[in-house]
Image: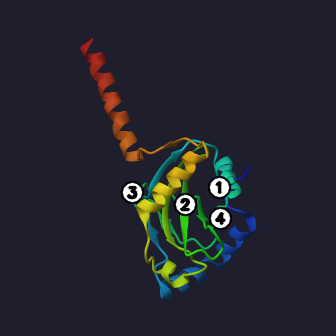
Amino acid sequence: MQSIVESLEPNVPYRVRTRLGPLITRLGRILGQPDYRLRDTEYVGTVQQPLDEFTETLQKHGFEWDPLAWYHQPPVGSEPNGSWAYRRALLADRQIHAILIAHSPEYIDVFAHEEYNWLRHPIKHLRQVGIKRKTGRNKMRKWIESHGIEVDVNSRRRRRVTQAKKYFHKCLASIIQ
């Protein structure tokens, strides 16, 4: 049985990326900044759908797995499981970049930003020029909802606080009774 990561990443591009990764990283450090920390403003939401099904939907509607994506570090500490780019055309000026973080096979956090297309503007892309976090997040959220996929827009932090408050109220109610 394949792991979440193995089932998400296409075999040939993934193998190429893992073999060329160190070279690409060195080149990225010379020309720009290969590491990228995801921000809360890029949090699209949480999709509760099997990972394979969600990525299949992305592929059907023009998203492409991005084998050259740099190492994205999410604020929640988990490793990203996939990086997908949507461009209106191959050499479009900009692209929507979606990053998936699977916490379980059916629980996926989606982050997104709009950025320069790495095929047309490789140096701007490497140097992270003109990244529009909120624009990308809003476009991706709208795209997900337009395809009938439910997305919980509350962050993991906010959901934890809400659950803690509910638990506190429940405990308080049991003490009062």
Q: Amino acid at mark 3?
A: Asp
Q: Where does the image place residue 60, in percent across and percent down from the top left?
A: 71, 55
Which residue is more in the foreground, 177 or 145? Answer: 145
* Mark 2 or mark 1: whose residue is earlier in sequence: 1
Which tag is nearer the camera, tag 1 or tag 4?
1
- In this figure, which residue is indicated by the disc labeled 2? 98
Q: Amino acid at mark 2?
A: Ala
- Say whether marks 2 and 1 touch (CB < 8 Å): yes
* Mark 2 or mark 3: whose residue is earlier in sequence: 3
Q: Quadrant of residue 161?
A: top left
Which residue does the image show at 61% across and 68% down from the upper left? 87
Residue 160 against residue 136 in the figure, above or below: above
Q: Amino acid at mark 4?
A: Trp
Determine the CA span between mark 2 and mark 4.
10 Å
- In this figure, which residue is indicated by the disc labeled 3? 40
Which residue is more in the foreground, 131 or 22? Answer: 131
Instruction: Categorize mark 4 by other alpha carbons within 10 Å: few (<14), some (14-19), many (20+).
Output: many
* Mark 1 or mark 4: whose residue is earlier in sequence: 1
Q: Amino acid at mark 1?
A: Leu
| Left or right: 115 as drawn, with respect to 40 | right
Which residue does the image show at 57% across and 71% down from the upper left? 69
| Left or right: 90 as drawn, with respect to 95 | right
Determine the CA span between mark 3 and mark 1.
22 Å
- In this figure, which residue is indicated by the disc labeled 1? 58
Determine the CA span between mark 2 and mark 1.
10 Å
Instruction: Categorize mark 2 by other alpha carbons within 10 Å: few (<14), some (14-19), many (20+).
Output: many
Which residue does the image show at 52% across and 51% down from the upper left? 142
- In this figure, which residue is indicated by the disc labeled 4? 65
| Left or right: 113 as drawn, with respect to 166 | right
- Say whether marks 2 and 4 touch (CB < 8 Å): no
Determine the CA span between mark 3 and mark 4.
23 Å
